[in-house]
Amino acid sequence: MVTQAFAQEAETPTEDNADAAIDATHGESLGDPTADTHATTQAHGGEHGSDVFPPFDPATFPSQLLWLAISFGALYLLMSRLALPRIGNVLDTRKATIDADLAAAEVSRQQTDAAIAAYEAALAAAKAKAQGIANESREAIQADLAAKRAAVEADLSDKVAQAEVRIAATKTEALTHVDEIAAETAQTVVTQLIGDIPTDSVRAAVAKASKE
């Protein structure tokens, strides 16, 4: 505002300045036909020229504030009506997707835990069943071996008893023939030594010797 006042005072013509300006104008007009054009251009340029940068000119502050308010309001409306709803929708969609993925992962984890528990239960049952089968098989084998061993032992006992009976019978039979064999042997020896001797005498002598 002070600069404009000084500019207006400088541009206000006085009587002396007016006469000097008229003389100068006439002199320049005679020397240069384009002097009027330059003077007019310089005059207009002087009227509109200023040494202050327009954004920092206090005279333009009201219009700058007005346009700032208008731009801020338009940007606010644009963001609140278009950009922010879209961003919110994108965030909601991403959140829903993440929640769905987390829920699916939780379901998968629960299913995996259930499958592992079922597998461990089945494995424990299979081990118990295998152990039971092994015990039953071992007991059955032991029972079979015991039965076979008992049968073999009974057969051996029977055979031993039969053999002992046969041995006793053979021994008895052999003992019954000992006297006859001894009598025949004695008779043969005596006959060779002293001649023929009655068989009854030889047998009586052998019987008497065996009793003694």
Image: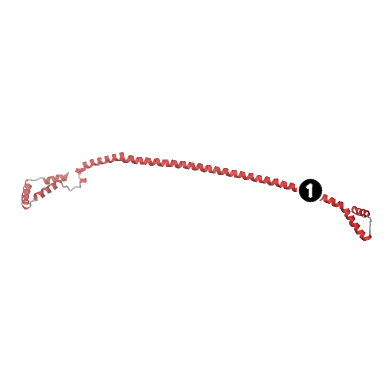
108 sits to left or right of 168: left
Up-down relation of residue 30 to residue 78 (above or below): below
177 sits to left or right of 105: right
Residue drawn 51% across the image and 42% down it:
115
Residue drawn 49% across the image and 41% down it:
111
Residue 162 x %, y %: 78, 48
Would you name the residue on which mark 1 appears?
Answer: 162
174 sits to left or right of 28: right
Residue drawn 92% across the image and 59% down it:
191
Residue drawn 20% across the image and 43% down it:
60
Residue 197 x %, y %: 94, 57
Residue 31 x %, y %: 6, 53
Rendering quarter of residue 135: top right
Depth check, front residue: 165 or 199:
199
Q: Secondary structure at mark 1?
A: helix
Depth check, front residue: 89 or 164:
164
Depth check, front residue: 185 or 78:
185
